[in-house]
Amino acid sequence: MAKTQKPQEIDPCAYQAIYYTGGHGVLWDFVENTELKQIAETIYEQKGYISAVCHGVVGLCL
């Protein structure tokens, strides 16, 4: 946890996939999160993978 990066610290060009995890907290954390949206869009535009499980699918509704 001590080395977890904030979304604004992520370089999406360095990744080939994004995985939206599940759980109830993501219903508030992922919805309308423009930083996560930008990361996912960049990965997708690079022909990367966007994935989700359980409640994590709300990350796809940005």
Image: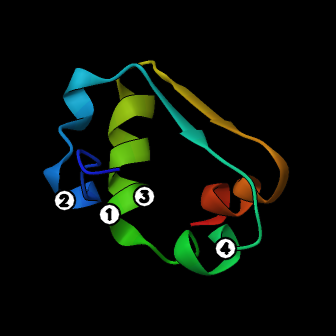
Q: Which amino acid does label 1 sit on?
A: Glu
Q: Which element carries disc 1, helix, strand or loop? A: helix
> Is residue 16 depicted above or below 39 in this figure?
above
In this picture, is 1 found above or below 61? above
Residue 31: percent from left, percent from top: 58, 75
Q: Mark 2 to mark 3: distance in Å?
A: 11 Å
**43 displayed left or right of 49:** left
Q: Distance between the residues labelled 1 and 3?
A: 5 Å
The reply to whether the C-beta atoms of the residues labelled 3 and 4 are less than 8 Å apart is no
Tell me the quadrant of the picture where the C terminus can be found.
bottom right
Q: In this view, does 23 lie to the left or right of 46?
A: right
Residue at the image point whose x is 64% and y is 55% from the top:
60
Percent x, y for residue 33? 44, 72
The tag earlier along the polypeptide, 1 or 4, is 4
Which element carries disc 3, helix, strand or loop? helix
Q: How is the image coloured?
A: rainbow
First reached walking from the N terminus: tag 2 or tag 4: 2
Q: How far apart are marks 2 and 4 (CA)?
A: 20 Å
Residue 41: name its quadrant: top left
Q: What residue type is labelled 3?
A: Lys
Residue identifier under label 3: 37
Question: Counting residues from the N terminus, which is met first, the one under dot 2 or under dot 3?
Answer: 2
Crowd tier of the residue under label 3, counting other residues whose Cα lies within 10 Å: few below 14, some 14–19, many 20 or above = some
Amino acid residing under circle 4 = Gly
Image depth: mark 1 or mark 4 in front: 4
Asked if labels 1 and 2 touch by Cβ distance under 8 angstroms, the answer is yes
Give the camera-side residue of 4 and 34.
4
Give the amino acid type for the residue marked by disc 2 in the picture: Gln
User: Which residue, given by chain and number where applicable, does mark 2 sit on?
Assistant: 8
Q: What number is the disc on residue 61?
A: none
Q: Is mark 2 on a helix, strand or loop?
A: helix
Cβ–Cβ under 8 Å for marks 2 and 4: no
